[in-house]
Amino acid sequence: MAEQLTGLAGDRVLLGRTSTAERVADILRSRISEGYFPPGTRLSEDGIGGALGVSRNTLREAFRLLTHERLLVHELNRGVFVRVLTVEDVEDIYRTRALVECAVVRGLGAPPYRLGGLVSAVEEGHRAAAENDWKALGTANIHFHRELVALAGSERADELMRSVFAELRLAFHVADDPRRLHEPYLARNARILRALQAGDTKGAERLLETYLADSLERVVEVYRRRVGEDAAGPS
C-alpha cells in the first residue's frame, strides 16, 4: 500500500484548487480501472486522504459515489474495499454492453462517421501487442469500446458506460493469462472499424454481437476458474 500511496500523491495536481468529491472519485475510479488497487484491496482513509491532500469528509463522499457505482463495497467494522465481482455481475455487465453498444452502431445513420477515436484505439492496441504488454492491450480494448459508445454523441450513454467499463476491468484483473484474454480481440476490433469505415453498420453490428458473446464466454470461463481456485485455497 505504501508504494501505491506514493504514486497516488502524484495525482494531487488533477484536483486543481478545489478538491471536490467528484474529482477524487474520478482519480480513484481511474486507478481502480488500471489495476492500481486490485479487487479485494482495503482502501485506507488516512493513507489515501494524506496522499491526495483531501479531508476525511471529501474522501468518504468519494467512496460513497464509487460504492454507488459498484466499484467499492463498505464492510461494517472493516472498512472500504475494492469490490470483487461475482460471475453474475460479469454476465450482467456484458448484457448491458450488448444492449448499449449494439444500439449505438444500429443508430448511427448515414456515413461518414467520426472514427478517429476508434482508429487511435486500434493503433494503441497494436503498439501494446508489439511490446507484449497485455495489460495495456486490455486497456486499449476498453478504449476502443468507449470510443464506439461515444459515436452516439450522448453524455448519458458515455457516463453509464464509463462505470460499466470500470466494473469490467475488475473482472479483467482476475485473469491469470491476460494475453489469452485480450489478444484475439485486437484483430476483431480492426474488423469492426473497417466495417464502419465502409459504412456497413449492419455488418459491424453482427461482428460486435459475436464479439461480445465470445468475450463473455471467455471471461466467465477464466473468472469461474480463478474464483474457484481462490475459494479452495492452497492445496
Image (spheres, helix red, strand yellow):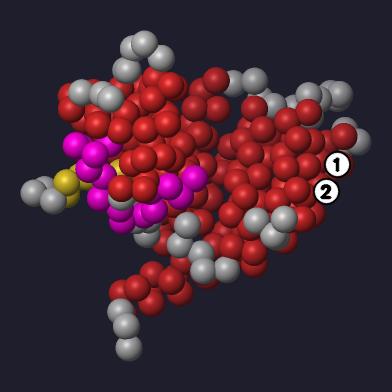
* Amino acid at circle 2: Arg
Q: Residue furthest right?
A: 198
Q: Which residue is mark 1?
A: 195
Q: Quadrant of the C terminus?
A: bottom left
Q: Position of residue 29 (x, y in %)?
A: 41, 36
What is the residue that sits farthest to the left in this orientation?
A: 77
Q: Amino acid at mark 1?
A: Ala
Q: Quadrant of residue 68?
A: top left
Residue 74: give x, y in percent of width and height.
20, 45
For the point 46% across and 37% down, the residue is 30
Which residue is nearer to you in this view: 191 or 50?
50
Boundaries of the magenta span: 34-48
Q: Which mark is residue 41?
A: none
SS assignment at label 1: helix
Assess whether mark 2 and mark 1 are in contact (beta carbons under 8 angstroms).
Answer: yes
Q: Which residue is mark 2?
A: 191
200 on left or right of 176: right
**Drawn side of residue 232 relative to residue 158, left or right:** left
Q: Position of residue 139 (x, y in %)?
A: 60, 46
Image quadrant of residue 163?
top left
